[in-house]
Image (cartoon, rainbow, N blue to C red):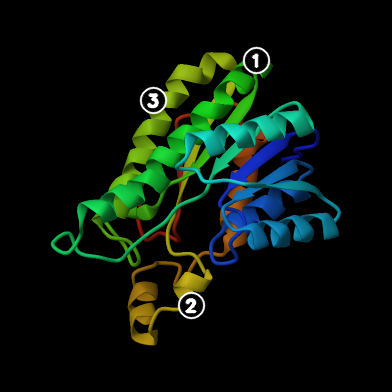
Amino acid sequence: MFELNDRVAIVTGSGSKKGIGRTIALALADQGAAVVVADLNLEGIEDTVNAITEAGGRAIGVELNVTNKESVDAMVEKVLAEYGRIDILVNNAGISQKVTVQDMTLEDMTRVFNVNMFGLFLCSQAVLETMKNQKFGRIISLSSVSAKRGGGVFGGAHYSASKAAVLGFSKNLAREVAVDGITVNCVAPGLVNTEIWKSLPEADAKNVIASIPMGRPGEVKEIASTIAFLASEEASYITGEEIDINGGSHMD
């Protein structure tokens, strides 16, 4: 199940070791997809591509600034030149900042929205023509539990707002493109066991864990496997949805 043979998947922000993008890229490649590792970090791109190919998968790296339309369009052109199609887009690239609203600047707000929402818009828009022509596509975007419960451990209000915008944007887009065989969904992770989480002071970490009914952070593989499902044929009748992956810390 969840085989992605002959599919081409772009994963933005998949060059960093700190987040979950690299694990997503590896999971999609493990299911048979040719993966485009798209990131600003050239060294990180190379590391992810090497990890995929050493495991027997297929991957290319593309330098990408999601906030720049020319960069996004150039990435799409390169992917089409290499593979001739784009089947899956995972909008994973994102940034956060822990700051109060009182101390937040307009530049802080703009920077977070530029990456988390406007970059996601540019990437999604750029693949639509190809996906419509194919009559097939999967757009999967990373939101956050912070979007739904009003904050969390790591982000400020601008982070929560940008991730809430991802949900609204994705639902609208899902309605627009369903007739073209394209599904649009989100995942909303809670606390995940990444390098960022490991950097928390011990006392803060214990308080966070106490608020999670399962009593632990999520693992990056648990996020990646959900995304692999949403990218597959088995999820063909799911669109406009967000899947909460938070160990029970927030329940709708």
Q: Residue at x 45, y 67 (%)?
A: 214
User: How far apart, in angstroms, are the residues tagged by discs 3 and 2?
Assistant: 36 Å
- Secondary element under disc 1, as helix, strand or loop, is helix
The residues bearing labels 3 and 1 have C-alpha atoms spaced at a distance of 20 Å
Query: How far across and down, in percent of the image, does residue 227 sit?
Result: 59, 45
Closer to the chain start, of discs 1 and 2, is 1
Which residue matches tag 3?
Answer: 172
190 vs 251, nearest the viewer:
190
The residue that appears at 46% across and 39% down in the rendered structure is 120
Seen in the image, is 64 located left or right of residue 115?
right
- Inter-mark Cα distance, 1 to 2: 44 Å
Q: Amino acid at mark 2?
A: Lys
Tag 1: amino acid: Asn
- Corner quadrant of residue 33: top right
Residue 146, compared with residue 193, is above or below; it is: above
Give above or below for 141 relative to 219: above
Residue 49 coordinates in the image, percent (x, y) = 74, 55
Tag shown at residue 133: 1
Side of 139 where 143 appears, left or right: left
The answer to which of marks 3 and 2 sits earlier in the sequence is 3
Q: Nearer the viewer, mark 3 or mark 1?
A: 1
In this figure, which residue is indicated by the disc labeled 2?
Answer: 198
